[in-house]
Amino acid sequence: MPSVINEQAFAQEVLQSSTPVLVHFWAPWCGVCRMIEPALERVRSEFGESLKLVGINADENLRLTSNYRITNLPTVLVFKEGRLLHRLEQLHRKDEVKSSLEKVLSLIH
């Protein structure tokens, strides 16, 4: 399971990170969010220390959810050196998550 952060930790954990970061916006009621977590973990473990994975509960962090225009859950944002590089929305299958993320991450590593 990714480390769950809030708005206060976002700047340090994501924007100031020298490591690329996958930010998973989720909610407790979102079944698809829970379903894709193992795929996100697998991708993170394949990249080892060169990739960080954090989770943000969209219901509890409305300012971040609004700032990044999160309208669908799950949404995964990819950040590198504080910049938003890519967003994945409307993810429905684990294999779709893994292949999409691997394509994006191959471009930034």
Image (spheres, rainbow, N blue to C red):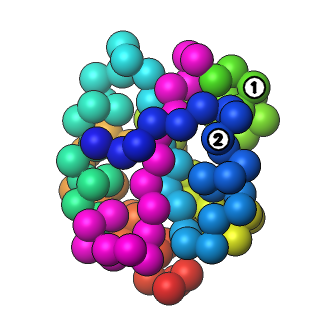
Res. 103 image quadrant: bottom left
- Where does residue 53 sit, x and y in percent of width and height? 43, 54
Which residue occupies the foreground of this view, 54 or 102?
Answer: 54
Residue in the image at 33% along x and 64% along y: 44
Q: Position of residue 81 (x, y in %)?
A: 70, 71
Determine which of the numbered discs, if any, sits on residue 9 in the image.
Answer: 2
Other-residue count near label 2 (Cα within 10 Å), few / some / many at <14 / 14–19 / ≥20? few
> Which is more toward the observer, 25 or 52?
52
Q: Position of residue 104 (x, y in %)?
A: 48, 72
- Where is residue 21 drawn, in percent x and y? 53, 61
Residue 7 figure quarter: top right
**Dot 2: what SS?**
helix
48 part of magenta stretch: yes
Q: Which residues are magenta?
A: 44-60
Which residue is under mark 1? Answer: 63
Q: Name the residue type under label 2.
A: Ala
Q: Nearer the viewer, mark 2 or mark 1?
A: 2
On whether residue 54 falls in the magenta region, the answer is yes
Badge 1: how crowded within 10 Å, few (<14), some, or many (20+)? few
Q: Is residue 63 left or right of residue 30?
A: right
Residue at position x 32%, y 74% from top? 48
Counting residues from the start of the chain, the first of labels 2 and 1 encountered is: 2
Amino acid type of the residue tagged 1 in the rendering: Arg
